Image: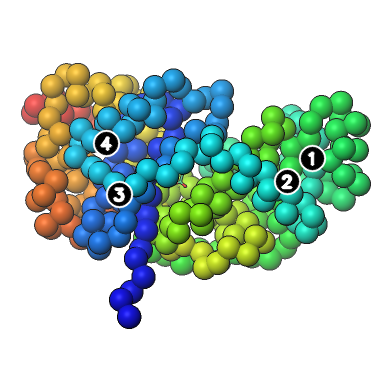
């Protein structure tokens, strides 16, 4: 019997334009998938209402195409799947795995025993766990709609990341019960991504390692919803600025659109992304065809990549 098809996805968030860091993740996902004959899906993660920027999804598609990346199918944007997410929240509540929560962000922060060091995750102590008979009661007392949290219990969650290696997380100690539906009624990223990946048959999740500590939450949701088997995870070391922080606006304009407008060619940009991914021994323009021919995930650096002056100079034609 032929092996079942493996499937991955490119999942841009249209909260801003694609920058060098996102492009690097998408390039590695694409090369990994195409060299192994996986299917590639495109999914726009536009749940973060207030932060979604008009035109950013179309911009991301245009930028990816300009780089030469393609995909086999575009699956529905997250904003179109509210009903699926709502059903899962009801299922988890009915099973006693999730509960309404009226704590404000400030309440949570004030009560936190230890803020998560890296990611701004604040440990939730469980003030609303077991407190409400139902959502209606929570709403009445608070005078506003509650959020819904997933109870994490006390089990440790372990998984083997194909790049980062074996991982083990104690959710109760690091994040506590986490939000799966925000107070505005919109599903949280953690839940949406699990339901979307399952619905689309995603077998391999490739993304930046800023999401490594989201994975145990997603695995817990998969287990609780009976969505097996879990995907294989590949978390890539991020591109960071010289200050050690994740590449962002503070490091200057690293949007693809900005380099494009300045006349940087896709080959030149690919050369930088490929150098950062261990696929070239120096920065030089390269075609996607050549990258596909020589791609080896084993050469990916294990440490974060620092975007510095030499990279800028190279993009400027040096
Ligand atoms: N949309 C997320 C991002 O742009 C990726 C989420 C995921 O791959 O699970 O960072």
Query: Mark 1 highlights which residue?
Result: 101
In three-dimensional space, the C-alpha distance between marks 4 and 2, rounded to whole angstroms, equals 35 Å
Q: Which residue position holds label 4?
A: 64
Q: Nearer the viewer, residue 267 or 39?
A: 39
Tell whether 25 sits left or right of 144: left
Q: Residues within 10 Å of mark 2 (few under 14, many from 20)?
A: many
Q: At numbered mark 1, what does the secondary structure look like: helix, strand or loop?
A: strand
Q: In the rendered view, does 318 fall on the left or right side of 12? A: left
The residue that appears at 82% across and 27% down in the rendered structure is: 144
Q: Nearer the viewer, mark 3 or mark 1?
A: 3
Q: Nearer the viewer, mark 3 or mark 4?
A: 3
Answer with the quarter of the image where residue 268 lies: top left
Among numbered discs 4 and 1, the one appearing first in the sequence:
4
Residue to which mark 3 is pinned: 72
Characterize the local packing of mark 4: few (<14), some (14-19) or many (20 or more) Cα atoms within 10 angstroms.
Answer: some
Residue 251, position as x, y percentages in the image: 34, 25
Mark 3 is surrounded, within 10 Å at the Cα level, by few (under 14), some (14 to 19) or many (20 or more) other residues, namely few
Secondary element at image label 2: strand
């Amino acid at each position: 019997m032929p092996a079942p098809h493996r499937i991955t996805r490119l999942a841009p968030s249209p909260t801003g334009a694609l920058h060098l860091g996102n492009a690097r993740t998408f390039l590695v996902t694409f090369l990994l998938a195409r060299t192994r004959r996986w299917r590639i899906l495109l999914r726009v993660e536009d749940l973060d209402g207030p932060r979604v920027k008009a035109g950013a999804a179309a911009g991301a598609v245009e930028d990816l195409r300009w780089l030469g990346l393609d995909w086999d199918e575009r699956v529905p944007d997250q904003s179109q799947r509210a009903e699926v997410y709502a059903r899962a929240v009801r299922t988890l509540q009915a099973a006693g795995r999730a509960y309404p929560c009226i704590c404000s962000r400030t309440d949570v922060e004030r009560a936190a025993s230890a803020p998560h060091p890296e990611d701004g995750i604040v440990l939730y102590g469980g003030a609303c766990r077991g407190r409400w008979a139902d959502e209606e009661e929570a709403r009445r007392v608070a005078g506003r709609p509650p959020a819904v949290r997933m109870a994490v219990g006390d089990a440790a969650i372990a998984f083997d990341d194909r790049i980062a290696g074996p991982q083990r997380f104690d959710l109760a100690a690091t994040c506590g019960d986490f939000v799966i539906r925000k107070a505005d009624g919109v599903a949280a990223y953690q839940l949406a991504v699990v339901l979307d990946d399952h619905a689309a048959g995603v077998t391999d999740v490739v993304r930046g390692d800023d999401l490594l500590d989201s994975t145990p939450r997603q695995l817990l949701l998969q287990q609780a919803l009976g969505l097996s088997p879990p995907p294989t995870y590949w978390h890539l070391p991020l591109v960071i600025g010289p200050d050690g922080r994740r590449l962002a606006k503070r490091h200057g304009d690293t949007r693809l659109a900005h380099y494009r407008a300045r006349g940087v060619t896709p080959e030149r940009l690919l050369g930088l992304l490929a150098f950062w991914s261990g696929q070239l021994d120096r920065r030089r323009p390269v075609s996607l065809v050549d990258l596909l021919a020589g791609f080896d995930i084993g050469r990916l650096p294990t440490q974060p990549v620092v975007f510095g002056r030499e990279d800028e100079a190279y993009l400027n034609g040096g």
